[in-house]
Image (tube, grey):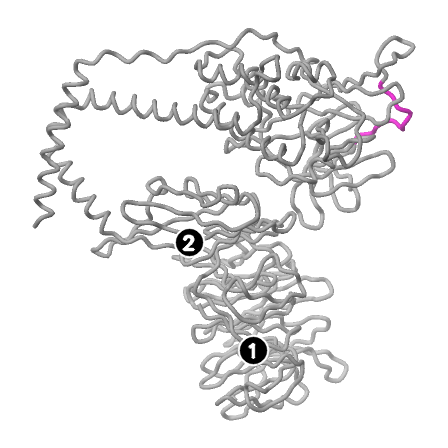
Amino acid sequence: MYQEYLIIGISFVGIAIILGLIGIFSGRKKTKPLETEKLPSRPTPSLQETQTIYMEPTVPVAETVAIDPDQTQTIVQTQAQSELGGSKTASGRKAYQALQAGAVVNERYRVERVLGEGAQGSVYVCTNIELGNMWAMKHFQGGLNEKDILVKLNHISLPKIADVFTDGDDRYIVESFVEGFPLHKFAEARKSELNEDLAISFMIQLSEALQYIHKQSIIHMDIKPQNIIITEDYKAILIDFGIASLKDGEKAKTYEIRGYTPSFASPEQKAFSSDIDERTDIYSLGATIAYIFKENTISKEFAAILNRCMAENKAARFSDVKILRDALLQLQKQKIDALHRRKRNRLLRRLAIPLVLVGVSSLGYYGYLQYREQNSELILPQTEFILSEQKEMPISIRQRYADGEERILPDKWIKWQSENSEIAVLENGIILAKNAGSTVLVGSYYNKTLEIPITVESGVLGVDISLKYSKTAKTEIYAGTGERDSQDGKLKAAAFFEPRSIAEWEDACYVVDGDLREIKNDQVSTIDLEFLKPEVIKADKNGLYLSVRPWQEGEAMLLGIFRLNPAKEELEEVFTLPIALKEISDFILTDKGIYFLLTDYVEEKTDLCFYDNQADEITVLLEQEDEIKGITQTQDGQIYLAQAKNSVIYRFAQGNLEYFAGAKYEKDFVDGPLPKLYMPMALTTNGNDLYVWDYHMLRKIILEDGKITDTVSLSGQADQEDDEVILTGSAYEVSYQHSTKTGISYVDGKVYICQPNSSYIRVVEE
């Protein structure tokens, strides 16, 4: 009742406000246009002026190479001239030879193509032969301090070094491969997209990267368009630390080589002054952005920032990059606010009269919506977020109204703050982890407050860790004492030798641990299978099905699957195969027959086969695939296969493998709607969703109509030491040893985990 009066009152007040706005804007003068100016004229650099010039003593102590996308030649100058009067470019080493496509370096990296070439070095796209992922490899001769610089760094706007090695005079640096355009090429190719707002965004990103490297006591000293890569999603990446320098007090060694790029170098660089600090990079950053905008008109405010960056007197520049970044952020905010005001004012002027006509109804409806929003409930994700440094994770908040309707709340409607923005922040629905530590993200929406704890870890080099741990999942010990033995008796005292698989049939559980063990009425007993040694166990209404290890019968080696009815103590053969050096590593039961994985453990290849119950025949469906570790089937009939080597889960449909989850050869731990897998070893299902044993973690892939909607972690740690084992606790507290034979089974609402290298069987309850 009172809400209706409130809504009516708001409606009449709204009409009065609209009429007042009409009166104000109808007689208001036009807004003064934004003041603009051009930057001071600067000479347009020639091709040679955009190269890096290196200075070294009369007797060179090292050679360096500068490689840019234009493939320009490096200029090397010494204090003594050659007999011909030019610069010396030789050091007495063997002539530099570029690598050809297909060449294998260090028995690990295969060259795919050339990215850039110089007189004494090249950059290639290469493939890690073992993992299959792509890297950039720099190949050069002589000394270069870039590896000493990059090995200290880990930032989203910087390349990450992965490997450094030498071969005689040849030096190699392997670092992350960044796809995109150098800044000057981006500006040429996308003139229509290049504007002041985008330039400010690039400059903010680069200032954050510089702020990070300056904290590491590193000065880049060669910022220029060729050394800034713009990716397809408009991220600015700072590359090429070939002439970067460690500040005093942080030097691990002394570098004699000095260098600069004339068009973008600060006055102190050109004068070869020893007084080099962060303001040198600030000058070059300003000169780089000014060069890109040499033909454009920009705002007075932005021009003032660039001119201050490029002040000849170092004392007149920004004193550090943080102050520059704050100035850019303030300008960005002013521009956004001004744009919003202009749009709002223009809209109000044009729509004043229509607004009067719809004012009562729209404001009345708005009042209803406000009331509805204030009385809604926000549902936080029931997960704990664990990310490695410089990684991202999408997040969504669900909203439930009083009438039961639910929806995902738009990201921009929630205002987020971080208790420590140096550790993690949340922007545009994305959590960005920065540095190791813990923080809480606090969001506000109407009268509601949201809190999301975030843990950021140092992580593992080359492995992306972005996990959402279930807050409710708990891991307990189901069976086992810690002793690897086969001992029957009370469940709490019984010992298991190497538990591999578990299944439930009627009122008992059955465990394969080299023998077949029955757990019934809190008692453990061993079922005698004579000479047969079971490997994997499954169950349906007809009894237990066991794949067994190969055994010798006469001169033949046999393997197969048997069916056991424990109530009748009857063991019968389903099928056998005369095959040596292979095993049935996993199988699933269907109404029409059995799908099974026939694995050659010498060649590490797998055949997917089907045994037809009616015809009593075996058909090979897929032949000689890379070793497939696990198979399962959801209640909609879809069959899923886990391929550990390739880090992928496939769906088997119409005789072919279809990609389903993971990224081929990218060994990562990433949850969410686009999961990445490290090494999927085993699969099971509750009928709808998939449970994956991923190296030494239990993860759950949530499906809706056969599509992934989310992925969460239920048990285990991605970055644990392999010998570290914590048996029980919450999802993130537990840890496991890695085992290639780990088996998982979904039984009566719980997931059971069996590991042959452990005497324990653990159970995870969500």
Q: What span is in magenta?
A: 89-98
- The residue positioned 63% from the left and 26% from the top of the image is 278
Instruction: Indicate left or right for 263 with 651 as reference.
Output: right
Foreground: 423 or 96? 423
Q: Residues within 10 Å of mark 1 (few under 14, many from 20)?
A: many
Q: Is residue 92 magenta?
A: yes
Q: Is residue 660 in view from this perspective?
A: no
Residue 58 screen position, x and y as percent: 88, 18
Q: CA distance from mark 2 to mark 1?
A: 31 Å
Taking the magenta stretch, the answer to whether it contains residue 276 is no
User: Quadrant of the rendered structure where residue 403 is?
Assistant: bottom left
Helix, strand or loop: magenta stretch: loop
Local SS, label 1: strand
Q: Position of residue 217 (x, y in %)?
A: 67, 33
Taking depth in this image into account, of 705 and 46 the one nearest to the observer is 46
Instruction: Give the residue at mark 1.
Output: 537
> Which residue is farthest bottom?
568
* Residue 127: x %, y % from top left: 69, 42
Image coordinates of residue 474 in percent, x first then y, are 48, 69
Would residue 481 be found to the left or right of residue 749 on screen?
A: right
* Disc on res. 621: none
In-front residue for pair 122/111: 122
Q: Is residue 476 left or right of residue 268?
A: left
Q: Secondary structure at mark 2?
A: strand
Residue 116 in view? yes
Residue for badge 2 = 709
Which mark is nearer the camera, 2 or 1? 2
Identity, as a three-letter code, of the amino acid under mark 1: Ile
Characterize the local packing of mark 2: few (<14), some (14-19) or many (20 or more) Cα atoms within 10 angstroms.
some
Where is residue 727, by image quadrant? bottom right
Label 1 near label 2: C-beta < 8 Å? no
